[in-house]
């Protein structure tokens, strides 16, 4: 049996879970951006028909006109698709993997020193110090 197998298995499982979760989160964010692209395309395509554009403006803009002082639109509600991309819920993975590494190091040193007999009267050991 491989020494430290539980540490290796736990590390690999956590790594695989983290990578899988990150890919799933990335796919969800990409779906939101595709939906945002469709909405913007709808706004572009509705040049002649203002009902779709008006509905979007009524839903998201606080004012229908541009503010004259800074020439910017004011949004009273952000579209869900352009909300801030959330931070990953897996920020804790690197510290846990580091902790596994430190624990594995000390576990390995403990197992390695189990068979060693330290005798304070041994002259060979004293000469090495």
Image: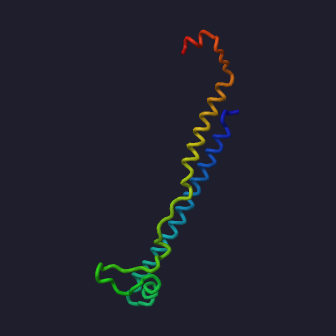
Determine the residue positioned at 52% across, 61% down: 26
Considering the image in quadrants, where does the C terminus appear?
A: top right
Question: In terms of image quadrants, where is residue 43?
Answer: bottom left
Determine the residue positioned at 46% across, 87% down: 55
Q: How many marks?
A: 0
Residue 29: percent from left, percent from top: 51, 66
Determine the residue positioned at 51% across, 70% down: 32
Figure check: 18 above or below 79? above
Residue 80: percent from left, percent from top: 50, 74
Q: Which residue appears farthest toward the top when viewing the image?
A: 123
Question: In terms of image quadrants, where is residue 101?
Answer: top right
Residue 88: percent from left, percent from top: 53, 59
Figure check: 35 above or below 3? below
Residue 9 or residue 66, whichever sits in front: 66
Residue 74: percent from left, percent from top: 39, 80
Residue 49 or residue 17, whichever sits in front: 17
Q: Which residue appears farthest toward the front when viewing the image?
A: 120
Residue 66 or residue 3, whichever sits in front: 66
Q: Which residue appears farthest toward the right when viewing the image?
A: 1
Considering the image in quadrants, where does the N terminus appear?
A: top right
Figure check: 61 above or below 107? below
């Amino acid at each position: 049996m491989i020494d430290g197998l539980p540490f290796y298995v736990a590390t690999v499982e956590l790594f695989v879970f983290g990578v899988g979760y990150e890919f799933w989160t990335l796919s969800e964010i990409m779906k939101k951006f595709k939906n945002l692209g469709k909405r913007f395309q709808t706004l572009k395509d509705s040049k002649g028909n203002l009902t779709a554009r008006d509905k979007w403006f009524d839903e998201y803009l606080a004012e229908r006109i541009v503010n004259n002082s800074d020439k910017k639109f004011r949004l009273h509600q952000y579209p869900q698709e352009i909300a801030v991309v959330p931070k990953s819920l897996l920020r804790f993975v690197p510290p846990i993997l580091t902790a596994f590494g430190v624990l594995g190091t000390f576990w390995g040193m403990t197992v390695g020193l189990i068979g060693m007999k330290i005798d304070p009267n041994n002259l060979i050991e004293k000469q090495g110090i």
